[in-house]
Image: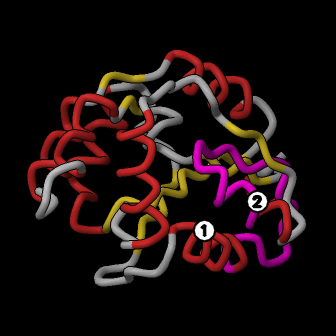
Amino acid sequence: MSAPDRPLAIVDIDGVLADVRHRLHHLQRRPKHWRAFFAAARDDEAHPEGLAIVERLQADHEVVLLTGRPRELEADTRAWLEAHGLGGLRLVMRPVSDRRPAAQVKVEQLRELALGRTVAVVVDDDPDVIAAMAEAGHPTFLADWEPRGRADEDALHRAQEDEGRT
């Protein structure tokens, strides 16, 4: 099947492919240290579960990485993806200065990506994104392999949904 004939599989990066726990402490302080949080993304370990899902999906889907990371991180993100065997995948990032909630941004971006295409699955670790995608009619899979403490979970939720930063 050619790429336009293949169903889309939409996969998030942070919390699904990349383990972000080592950098969440930058979001728990006041003020948040965004530059350090994003700079540390280069050092994220890969989640074997996420890599396995992408490997499986690539067999019969066009895998698109849809991330809340800002476009300013594109070079670092592409380098990380390349280092983890994911360099050839299409990458869609948060537009510059877009501070809307991750769920809203991702649903809108997927609407554009999916024109005339079948979306087979959306894989994300954010329950708000999963709920918004399901409400938009897309099949979803919640990536739940990155356990976080309550403070980390709260800080990440605020960053994604309240502050629109990741």
Tell whether 103 sits left or right of 41. Answer: right
Q: Which mark is residue 131?
A: 2
Residue 130 location, quadrant: bottom right
Q: Secondary structure at mark 1?
A: helix
The residue under label 1 is: 103
Q: Is residue 150 above or below residue 39?
A: above
Front residue (pair 165, 109): 165
Measured Cα–Cα span from mark 1 to mark 2: 8 Å
Q: Secondary structure at mark 2?
A: helix
Front residue (pair 79, 40): 40
The image shows residue 52 at horizontal and vertical percentages of: 62, 19
The image shows residue 113 at horizontal and vertical percentages of: 67, 72
Protein image colouring? secondary structure
Front residue (pair 119, 141): 141
Q: Are marks 1 and 2 in contact (CB under 8 Å)?
A: yes
| Residue drawn at the location 28% of the way across and 58% of the way down | 74
Residue 80 location, quadrant: top left
| Residue drawn at the location 76% of the way across and 71% of the way down | 114
| Residue drawn at the location 41% of the way across and 71% of the way down | 94
Q: Quadrant of the C terminus?
A: bottom left
Earlier-in-chain disc, 1 versus 2 = 1
Tag 2: residue type? Ala
Q: Which residues are magenta?
A: 112-132
| Residue drawn at the location 83% of the way across and 52% of the way down | 7
Tag 1: residue type? Ala
